[in-house]
């Protein structure tokens, strides 16, 4: 799988182990920063680069690692075509893809450790969007909501 990853200064300590795990599993990883613990980055900027690469089709999924993951998830969900989930457990990491077709995983380095991260990543990357009609119907409704909001913003 092609994955883009980015973190902020608070997520930096966890980003390296995440990349090592992904590459060991055969995934192609584009690391777009930060590259040092003292490098300042704001989660809206981190999010935009990841979302742009997903929407361009350059990668299949994105991963954001920051302090608690909340801001990154909020910012990502503002971008058309992106469905982001904050996951600190294995069940949510799998179900968010299977039921909601999530394409961006957000995690907090100050919340979880390396072993749990590996389990979460395996669940997230191993999951596929369900073929069941009810889940596809719901995700289509999310896309309708996005289009409606985009139209309203364009008219404002």
Image (cartoon, rainbow, N blue to C red):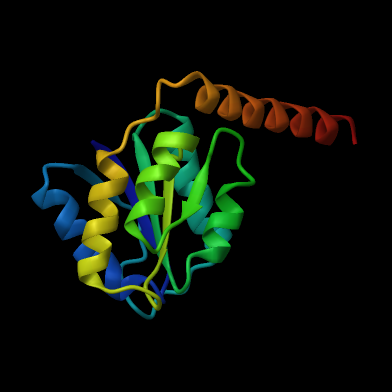
* Residue sitting at x 48%, y 32%: 55
Where residue 133 appears, as percent x and y from the top left, is 50, 19
Residue 154 vertical position relative to residue 94 in the rendered view, above or below: above
Measured as percent of width and height from the top left, residue 139 is found at 57, 29
Q: How many marks?
A: 0
Quarter of the view holding residue 132? top left
Quadrant assignment for the N terminus: top left
Which one is nearer the viewer's eye here, 48 or 86?
86
- Does 88 sit left or right of 153 as displayed? left
In the image, is residue 27 above or below residue 37? above
Q: Residue at x 32, y 56 (%)?
A: 90
State the image coordinates of residue 18 (x, y, percent, origin top left): 23, 60
Asked whether, in this view, residue 103 is left or right of residue 142, the answer is: left
Counting from the top left corner in percent of width and height, residue 140 is at: 60, 23
Left or right: residue 115 versus residue 12 is left
Residue drawn at x 46%, y 40% as measured from the top left: 102
Say which residue appears at 64% left-offset and 32% top-offset.
Answer: 142
* Residue 146, quarter of the rendered image: top right
């Amino acid at each position: 799988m092609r994955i883009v990853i980015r973190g902020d200064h608070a997520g930096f300590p966890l980003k390296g182990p995440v990349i090592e795990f992904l590459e060991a599993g055969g995934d192609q990883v584009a690391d777009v920063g930060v590259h040092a613990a003292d490098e300042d980055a704001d989660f809206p900027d981190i999010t935009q680069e990841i979302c742009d690469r997903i929407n361009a089709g350059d990668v299949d999924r994105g991963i954001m690692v920051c302090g608690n993951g909340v801001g990154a998830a909020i910012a990502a969900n503002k971008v058309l075509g992106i469905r982001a989930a904050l996951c600190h457990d294995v069940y949510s990491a799998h179900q968010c893809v299977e039921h909601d077709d999530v394409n961006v995983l957000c995690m907090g380095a100050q919340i979880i450790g390396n072993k749990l991260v590996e389990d979460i990543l395996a669940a997230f990357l191993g999951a596929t969007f369900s073929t069941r009609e009810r889940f596809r119907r719901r995700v289509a409704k999310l896309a309708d909501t996005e289009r409606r909001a985009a139209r309203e913003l364009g008219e404002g």
